[in-house]
Image: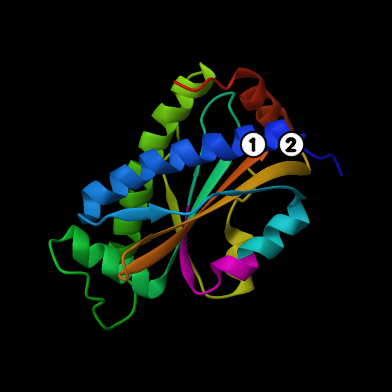
């Protein structure tokens, strides 16, 4: 399996960190909470690896997918555990972050989809500025993951190729909620990002 040169790995980590910082600002605006972001983890993987990673992190979560439009390829997956989805919705409605009892419903899925839409909107603008290429996003798709069949239903790789770069970032708001953002880029897009990345 191909590997990234250390410099390119650092570039992808820096791009992900900048994008995630802008996403965190959007989440802060929606929830009125200070969002802390961990350093990103960058790996070269294949499609089977991605399924395993999503099974490990995504079970018992709501996973929201947003991929890119036109000729820029990649995928972004936001994962919140069910309790955290309830906390996010309560915060967005002006509450103090109390998870209401009961099953998740369409309102919860709509809420977390809007969160992802706002986070990725900010991230796409930041990425556009860094690589000097217009990056636009498709609408979010939310999936309640309670079984392996739910993982299979997510269009994890809406682009060709078996080797790709996956970047995992963790974030949290105090002790109220935690989440995971996973970014997936095929090798061609990864090379383009590394070749064109310029810090502002």
133 to 75, vertically: above or below: above
How packed mark 2 is, by other alpha carbons closer than 10 Å (few <14, some 14-19, many 20 or more), is few
How packed mark 1 is, by other alpha carbons closer than 10 Å (few <14, some 14-19, many 20 or more), is some
For label 2, the residue is 6
Q: Give the left or right position of residue 81, taking residue 115 as reference.
A: right
The residues tagged by marks 2 and 1 sit, at their Cα atoms, a distance apart of 6 Å
Region rendered in magenta: 55-64
Q: Residue at x 23, y 56 (%)?
A: 31
For label 1, the residue is 10
38 to 151, vertically: above or below: above
Whether residue 143 appears in this view of the structure is no
Name the outermost residue toward the bottom. 101
Query: Where is residue 194 drawn, in percent x and y?
Result: 65, 26
**Helix, strand or loop at mark 1:** helix
Please give the label number shown on residue 109: none
99 to 194, vertically: above or below: below
Query: Where is residue 5 drawn, in percent x and y?
Result: 77, 34
Q: Quadrant of the C terminus?
A: top left
Magenta segment: does it hold 10? Answer: no
Q: Residue at x 77, y 57 (%)?
A: 48
**Helix, strand or loop at mark 2:** helix
Q: Nearer the viewer, residue 47 or 88?
A: 88
């Amino acid at each position: 399996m191909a590997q990234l040169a250390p410099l390119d790995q650092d570039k992808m980590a820096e791009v992900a960190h900048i994008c995630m910082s802008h996403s965190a600002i959007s989440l802060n605006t929606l929830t009125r909470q200070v969002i802390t972001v961990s350093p990103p983890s960058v790996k070269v993987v294949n499609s089977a690896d991605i399924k395993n990673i999503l099974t490990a992190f995504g079970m018992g979560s709501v996973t929201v997918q947003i991929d890119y439009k036109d000729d820029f390829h990649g995928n972004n997956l936001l994962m919140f555990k069910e309790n955290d989805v309830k906390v996010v919705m309560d915060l967005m409605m002006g509450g103090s972050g109390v998870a209401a009892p009961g099953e998740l419903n369409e309102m919860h899925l709509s809420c977390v989809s809007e969160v992802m839409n706002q986070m990725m909107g900010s991230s796409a603008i930041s990425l556009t500025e860094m690589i000097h290429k217009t990056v636009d996003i498709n609408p979010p798709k939310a999936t309640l993951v309670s079984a392996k069949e739910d993982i299979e239903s997510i269009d994890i790789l809406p682009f060709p190729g078996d080797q790709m770069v996956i970047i995992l970032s963790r974030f949290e708001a105090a002790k109220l909620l935690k989440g995971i953002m996973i970014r997936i880029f095929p090798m061609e897009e990864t090379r383009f990002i590394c070749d064109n990345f310029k810090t502002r």
